[in-house]
Amino acid sequence: MTQPLKCTAWIITVSEPTTAAFPSRLKAQEDYLGTQLAPWLLDTPPAWLARCHSFHFMRYIDASHEGHGGITVELRFLGSADVLAEAAPEVERALSEQQASGAITKSQGKEVSGWRADDAYGGTTLNEPFAHLLASSSRLALELLREPRRDFAARKAVVQNWTHCVRLIASGMG
């Protein structure tokens, strides 16, 4: 992509479980990702998604990040301003349907803005490779989370192995 990447995002708040214990909150978030986000973005992706540079998400379980309270997922799409403008109504519709079904309690869209990897993430020369890493990680997580046969311990082991591989690739140190 030769144009600077643009980003649009939604902060999605997942319904709280009956208990505030961390494992229950994590399960609520993982259930949302595996049963709502994975089918929508992987099985029946909207047509405009193929014209996006990529999508990824960040997960939050508490209010430690500004703008995030409760159990949230920040879903981000990267691409041209035109494609992101085309995507917005469909994303809003899908999230409204999820809210109506009780899968989420609310969603809040963010303004389209420029996207770049700041110096802490390698700087602007690594924008696209870093965006691809985030997208690949998000797709891997969605695929893993929609496999109900894997319990938390099994998923944790898989993620630790992925992290080990990325460290070996990036630094030669696992």
Image: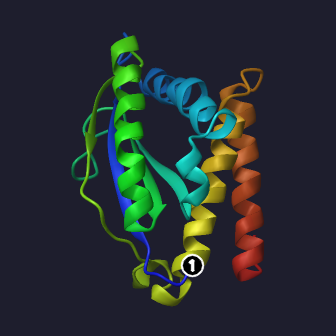
Q: Seen in the image, is 65 located left or right of residue 21?
A: left
Residue nearest the viewer, comparing 53 with 132: 53
Query: What's the amino acid at mark 1?
Result: Met
Residue 69 in which image quadrant: top left
Residue 21, position as x, y percentages in the image: 40, 22
Q: Residue 114: x percent and y percent?
A: 33, 73
Does residue 74 appear left or right of residue 169 in this picture? left
Q: Residue at x 53, y 84 (%)?
A: 2
Q: Position of residue 113 (x, y in %)?
A: 29, 67
Q: Quadrant of the C terminus?
A: bottom right
Q: Is residue 118 left or right of residue 37?
A: left
Describe the element under mark 1 as helix, strand or loop. Answer: loop
Furthest-bottom residue in this view = 125
| Nearest the eye: 123 or 89 | 89
User: Relative to residue 73, is residue 32 drawn left or right?
Assistant: right
6 or 127, which is in the foreground?
Answer: 6
- Say whether residue 86 is visible: yes
Vertical placement of residue 75 versus 82, above or below: above
Image point (40%, 51%), residue name = 86
Q: Is residue 15 visible?
A: no
The residue positioned 71% from the left and 37% from the top of the image is 144
- For the N terminus, the quadrant is bottom right
User: Badge 1 is on which residue?
Assistant: 1
Identify the image's colour scheme: rainbow, by chain, secondary structure or one colour: rainbow
